[in-house]
Image (spheres, rainbow, N blue to C red):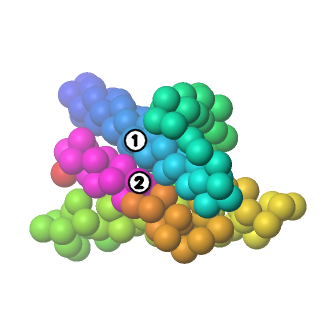
């Protein structure tokens, strides 16, 4: 009985850690995506006051996040189990292993989706390497957080 209760508690904690990690990656990615879009408009000569930036960021958190969440869930669902295996051999670098796995997972997921999407890219910020890297760093933060929230 105790083994089952312990396993259930660990699975519950893992699910909570995964959901928190997804929410962090999605929120960071949505904000980055919004700022890249606004920067592109500014380069075209548009004036965008802070109030518009904030409102647009909030709207994108609500509108872009659900779509991006699907991509993040798939990326983390594939990369975090790999991180768990690798981190067994590198327990002192556990957080880094999870962060790098999540970063790599998101990059691969975005590249696959961009390859399959009918338009040049599904996520505008990923048209340039630094936009993709910044969005992937959001996933890296989520991977690191997941490692911190999960017991060894």
Residue that badge 2 annotates: 138
Asked if residue 143 can be seen in this view, the reply is no
- Residue at image coords 59%, 45%: 47
Q: Secondary structure at mark 1?
A: helix
> Toward which corner of the image does residue 99 lie, by quadrant?
bottom left
The stretch in magenta equals: 138-151
- Residue at image coords 33%, 53%: 141
Q: Secondary structure at mark 2?
A: helix
Labels 1 & 2 near each other (Cβ < 8 A): yes
Q: Earlier in the sequence, mark 1 or mark 2?
A: 1
Of the 4 image quadrants, the one containing the N terminus is top left
User: Residue 38: where, in percent of width, then height?
Assistant: 59, 49
- Residue at image coords 32%, 61%: 98
> Front-most of 77 and 6?
77
Asked if residue 67 can be seen in this view, the reply is yes
User: Residue 113: where, in percent of width, then height?
Assistant: 71, 61
Is residue 50 magenta-colored?
Answer: no
User: Residue 150: where, in percent of width, then height?
Assistant: 25, 44
Is residue 140 magenta-colored?
Answer: yes
In this picture, is 49 found above or below 97?
above
Q: Residue furthest left?
A: 92
């Amino acid at each position: 009985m105790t083994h089952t209760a312990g396993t259930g508690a660990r699975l519950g904690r893992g699910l909570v850690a995964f959901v928190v990690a997804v929410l962090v990656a999605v929120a960071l990615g949505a904000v980055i995506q919004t700022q890249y879009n606004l920067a592109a408009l500014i380069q075209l000569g548009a004036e965008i006051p802070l109030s518009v930036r904030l409102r647009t960021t909030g709207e994108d958190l609500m509108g872009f996040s659900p779509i991006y969440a699907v991509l993040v869930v798939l990326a983390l669902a594939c990369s975090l189990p790999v991180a768990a295996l690798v981190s067994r051999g590198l327990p002192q670098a556990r957080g880094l292993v999870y962060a790098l796995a999540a970063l790599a997972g998101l990059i691969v997921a975005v590249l696959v989706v961009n390859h399959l999407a009918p338009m040049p890219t599904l996520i505008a910020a990923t048209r340039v390497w630094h936009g993709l890297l910044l969005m992937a760093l959001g996933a890296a933060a989520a991977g690191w957080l997941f490692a911190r929230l999960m017991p060894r």
